[in-house]
Image (cartoon, rainbow, N blue to C red):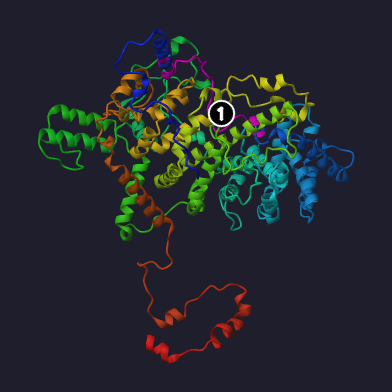
């Protein structure tokens, strides 16, 4: 993929020399004022309202549906309705869709699916549009947006129960393999929305099915809940010896990036891929549970036994899932909001408990033993003979806060399996949806990651148009380019919105994959992470943030009257320059803030405990870029920015720390620290840079050993017994293909009887 340039080549250096420090002549008053202004800006003290943003798996239901369509596609809503009404009138007389009984609706849907099996592409497209109109909520018979969303969801459950998804999956396979459409798109100098009509209709129906069935509501009937679980199973596991649906979508992404299918509607593919992976896997917010006690609870103090058991659970789960630490800036959920000021019991001190790794205890004892008794005992953390009493107390305190993550347990198990493969036997790997997805992605995973990052680079607002970059606008550009200023403004908003949605889907997809692979096995997570790093994901994310993030988050690239389902209910008003510039009345753009938080979390996961990757943050001068992001007053975003600054402060030098004391204070207040963490100074032995390359190579060797042991299982293992008995070998039953019985005589004639055998040469060789 294209190597993103250093994000902040012209910004101040990482060691703080660009902050205006140093001795010299007294500056002029104007210079002093400019310095103060620069200092205020660097500390993030720009006036910005606090953003009331609630992070979640996805945006609201209506917003997620509306982002499926570009504004250029709005004319097709009418086309879909016309195709449905023409077909419906030939099958049902004197009634509308909403007036039919459920059995009659099912019978009509069965007829629609039967009419899809025609040779004519034009007739097949019309029937597919009729199905899409049903999935869109039969808006022609609705009076409000609420009605459209209700009937869209009802119709999608009905369509799935009648086998619509599997039918459209077969049609999608046909369109992907349509070489004529690919060659036609390759010959065109400019690709437009007309080149992907069939694919857009198919993907839209499948996305509406996935998104509407994924949505859970308390009022859902037992039948709908059963349908949802059945659909999840169908998406998660291979059906009829076919690959999981997510792998088909991944192959579409790589085919698009390779230039073999430039007409693919990549935004719809990415949105569908993200939602399918989300439907495969466990809900994301189940991994985001806080393990700390709620700051606002005023329950009775727990007993000592309860605290011990709670601590054990926290040490195991919190270490594995890399959960979001409790943050005093985050408001409590509505159900836990205190009713009166008297009931609020604010805790004293820092709002989180520090953690200690086994490695930290060993390092502390190694230094103490060298200092007091002159030798060390390796990894022994129990023998304290010869050490003074304060060291005993320190070790006791460290052990009280020690945690062992699931990742540490998995790494230890891998080491044991490598050392004793015969005695421990073969590992039993449960066939979970996450495991099946990883197995399917394994051998093409580098190509998948490179393709996603290429598209992310093309969609980033800081990227400049280049001749060799990917064209991601094939499913937004109209056949005829705009000729008026108003049309150009509308298309410009549509293009920017299109790119924002692509960034949103890719950032959410990558974060989702990393979180679930880390939960499934640490080396699966590390394999994906390493290929993201090799594909320059770290400088790419920094390049994305090397812009005015506040302007990006508050961008108004939307036209509310053109959003689905609003555009299907009311007649479109005449657009004016004022209405286009006004946008919506929201304080910020939800999808852009969501994307920024996802990318920061992604960057945190790639660099945590990886000192070589932390040095990449320093080399690419990320500190000033990240500090500018602190201008956005949103607790979750600021927390992940401060985490990224914290891990590199030891490399930035004393002058930088001295010039950024406000940032250092914020890190101390908001970010969890280790018990013996010297993040602010740089005395940590892990901060020394000489083994960075060896660290990455060792990790890569461990990942390859894991993948080879678990997934590269040879047919003839060196440990398998050999049968030397001729009669036993000749008496073994071989599974032959069915057609072999019909052609074995021909095979014998061709492969045995007609082949000359030189017995002398055969005897000499043996």
The spot of residue 244 in percent (x, y) is 57, 51
Q: Residue at x 44, y 30 (%)?
A: 8
Q: Residue at x 57, y 42 (%)?
A: 469
Q: Any magenta on residue 352?
A: no
The spot of residue 231 in percent (x, y) is 62, 45
- Is residue 466 or residue 763 the one in the foreground? 466
The answer to which image quadrant residue 533 occupies is top left
The spot of residue 514 in percent (x, y) is 46, 41
- Is residue 408 or residue 598 the one in the foreground? 598
Q: Which residue is mark 1?
A: 592
Q: Give the answer, above or below, for where 213 lies relative to 634.
A: below
Q: Any magenta on residue 54?
A: yes
Q: Give the answer, above or below, for where 386 lies relative to 187.
A: above
- Is residue 754 or residue 233 the one in the foreground? 754
Quick check: can you spot residue 643? no
Q: For numbered disc 1, what is the local secondary structure?
A: helix
Counting labels gives: 1
The prevailing secondary structure element of the residues shown in magenta is loop
The spot of residue 658 in percent (x, y) is 31, 19
The answer to which image quadrant residue 386 occupies is top left
Q: Is residue 32 left or right of residue 452?
A: left
Q: Over which residues does the magenta segment extend?
A: 39-65
Q: State which quarter of the image contains the C terminus.
A: bottom left
Direction bottom: furthest residue: 760
Q: Is residue 601 left or right of residue 81?
A: left
Q: Residue at x 38, y 85 (%)?
A: 765
């Amino acid at each position: 993929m294209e190597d993103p340039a250093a994000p902040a080549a012209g910004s101040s250096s990482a060691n703080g020399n660009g902050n205006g420090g140093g001795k010299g002549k007294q500056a002029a008053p104007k210079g002093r004022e400019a310095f103060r202004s620069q200092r205020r800006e660097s500390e993030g003290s720009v006036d910005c309202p606090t953003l009331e943003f609630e992070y979640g798996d996805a945006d609201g239901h209506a917003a997620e549906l509306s982002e499926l369509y570009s504004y250029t596609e709005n004319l097709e809503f009418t086309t879909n309705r016309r195709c449905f009404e023409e077909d419906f009138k030939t099958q049902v007389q004197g009634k509308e869709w909403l007036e039919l009984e459920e059995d009659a609706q099912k019978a009509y849907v069965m007829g629609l699916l039967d009419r899809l099996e025609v040779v004519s592409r034009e007739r097949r497209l019309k029937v597919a549009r009729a199905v899409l109109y049903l999935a869109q909520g039969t808006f022609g018979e609705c009076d409000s947006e609420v009605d459209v969303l209700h009937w869209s969801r009802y119709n999608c459950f009905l369509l799935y129960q009648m086998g619509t998804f599997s039918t459209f999956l077969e049609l999608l396979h046909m369109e992907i393999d349509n070489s004529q459409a690919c060659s036609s798109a390759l010959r065109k100098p400019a690709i437009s929305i007309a080149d992907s009509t069939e694919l857009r209709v198919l993907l839209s129906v499948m996305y509406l099915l996935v998104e509407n069935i994924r949505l859970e509501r308390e009022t859902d009937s037992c039948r709908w809940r059963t349908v949802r679980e059945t659909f999840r199973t169908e998406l998660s596991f291979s059906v009829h010896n076919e690959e999981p649906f997510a792998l088909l979508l991944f192959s579409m992404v790589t085919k698009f990036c390779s230039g073999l299918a430039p007409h693919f509607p990549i935004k719809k593919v990415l949105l569908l891929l993200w939602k399918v992976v989300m439907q495969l896997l466990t809900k994301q917010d189940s991994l985001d549970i806080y393990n700390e006690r709620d700051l606002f609870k005023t329950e009775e103090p727990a007993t000592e036994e309860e605290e011990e058991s709670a601590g054990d659970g926290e040490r195991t789960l919190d270490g594995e899932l890399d959960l979001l630490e409790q943050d005093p800036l985050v408001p409590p959920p509505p159900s836990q909001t205190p009713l009166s000021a008297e009931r609020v019991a604010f805790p004293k001190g820092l709002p989180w408990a520090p953690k200690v790794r086994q490695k930290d205890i060993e390092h502390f004892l190694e230094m103490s033993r060298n200092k007091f008794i002159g030798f060390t005992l390796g990894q022994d953390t129990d023998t304290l003979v010869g050490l003074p009493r304060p060291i005993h107390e320190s070790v006791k305190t460290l052990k009280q806060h020690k945690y062992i993550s699931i990742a540490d347990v998995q790494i230890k198990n891998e080491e044991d399996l490598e050392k004793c493969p015969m005695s421990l036997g073969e590992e039993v790997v449960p066939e979970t949806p996450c495991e099946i997805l990883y197995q399917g992605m394994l051998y093409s995973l580098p190509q998948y990651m490179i393709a996603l990052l290429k598209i992310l680079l093309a969609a980033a607002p800081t990227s400049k148009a280049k001749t060799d970059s990917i064209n991601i606008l094939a499913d937004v550009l109209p056949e005829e380019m705009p000729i008026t200023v108003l049309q150009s403004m509308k298309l410009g908003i549509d293009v920017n919105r299109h790119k924002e949605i692509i960034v949103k889907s890719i950032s959410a997809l990558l974060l989702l994959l990393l979180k679930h692979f880390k939960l499934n096995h640490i080396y699966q997570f590390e394999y994906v992470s390493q290929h993201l790093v090799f594909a320059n994901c770290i400088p790419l994310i920094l390049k994305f943030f090397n812009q005015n993030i506040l302007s990006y988050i508050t961008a108004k690239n939307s036209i509310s009257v053109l959003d689905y389902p609003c555009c299907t209910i009311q007649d479109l008003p005449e657009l004016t320059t004022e209405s286009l510039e006004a946008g919506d009345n929201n304080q910020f753009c939800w999808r852009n803030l969501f994307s920024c938080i996802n990318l920061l979390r992604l960057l945190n996961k790639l660099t945590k405990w990886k000192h070589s990757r932390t040095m990449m943050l320093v080399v690419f001068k990320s500190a000033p870029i990240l500090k500018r992001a602190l201008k956005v007053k949103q607790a979750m975003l600021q927390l992940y920015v401060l985490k990224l600054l914290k891990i590199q402060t030891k490399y930035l030098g004393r002058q930088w720390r001295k010039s950024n004391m406000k940032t250092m204070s914020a890190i101390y207040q908001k970010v969890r620290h280790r018990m013996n963490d010297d993040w602010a100074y740089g005395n940590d032995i892990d901060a020394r840079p000489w083994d960075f390359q060896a660290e990455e190579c060792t990790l890569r060797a461990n990942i390859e050993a894991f993948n080879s042991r678990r997934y590269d299982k040879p047919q003839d293992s060196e440990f398998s017994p050999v049968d030397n008995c001729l009669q036993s070998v000749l008496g073994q039953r071989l599974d032959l293909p069915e057609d072999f019985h019909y052609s074995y005589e021909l095979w014998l004639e061709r492969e045995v009887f007609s082949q000359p055998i030189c017995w002398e040469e055969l005897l000499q060789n043996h």
